[in-house]
Amino acid sequence: MDTIKLAEELKKITPFPNMPREIFESLKGLLPITAVELLVIHPDNSFVLIEKTGQFNGWALPSGYIGLNESLEDACQRVAERDLGAKLKSTDFITVFNWPKGGQRSGDGHAISLLFKCEVRGNIKNGKYFKKIPEGILAHHKIMIEAYFEKYEK
């Protein structure tokens, strides 16, 4: 295919998070994609996980890819509302994780995860608090939770 024509067609596509899924999946194989990962921690040091179904069935941190021109805070708020049914009271950036394709992340393509420690306003409508990491959690989310508690909550 002519690359100039392809580039012109790509300019017509609605940006993420509203782009067609098949376009997004194709781009994931070509570019690093950045996600926000929310570690919602209760004062008793329990943390929230949500139950995922679809490509992966099991427990996961509330998370999502950042949209074009979306601030990190807005992306975190969007994910909290979608995954937890709650608004965030605070978001504190913790660290970044780099997941090259074929690495420890259980997904396609190269991803960058930005981990945020968050506090919600009120109660969550979706998800469950855990004191220990359960079986059946996304492998890279387990790594992120362990890294956080090892470094910050000794």
Image (tube, grey):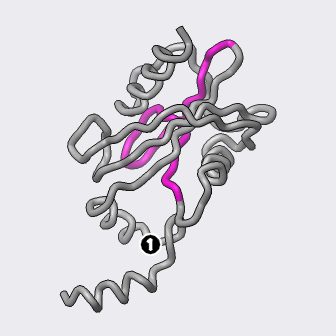
Left or right: where 53 falls relative to 79:
left
Q: How many marks?
A: 1
Left or right: where 82 falls relative to 18:
right
Residue at horizontal 26 percent and vertical 45 percent from the top? 100
Question: Residue reaching furthest top?
Answer: 154
> In which quarter of the view is residue 139 placed?
top left
| Screen quadrant of the N terminus | bottom left
Residue at horizontal 37 percent and vertical 33 percent from the top? 140
> In which quarter of the view is residue 71 placed?
bottom right
Residue at horizontal 36 percent and vertical 89 percent from the top? 8
Eyeballing the image, is 111 above or below 120?
A: below
Is residue 119 or residue 71 the one in the foreground?
71
Left or right: where 60 falls relative to 1:
right
Eyeballing the image, is 39 above or below 83?
A: above
Residue indicated by mark 1: 20
Question: Residue reaching furthest right?
Answer: 122
**Residue 42 coordinates in the image, percent (x, y):** 68, 21
**Residue 9 coordinates in the image, percent (x, y):** 37, 87
Residue at horizontal 20 percent and vertical 90 percent from the top? 2
Q: Is residue 55 magenta?
A: yes
**Residue 128 coordinates in the image, percent (x, y):** 61, 27
**Dot 1 alpha-carbon crowd within 10 angstroms: few under 14, some 14 to 19, many 20 or more:** few
Q: Is residue 68 magenta?
A: no
- What stretch of residues is rendered in magenta? 44-66
What amino acid does circle 1 point to? Pro
| Secondary structure of the residue carrying numbered label 1 | loop
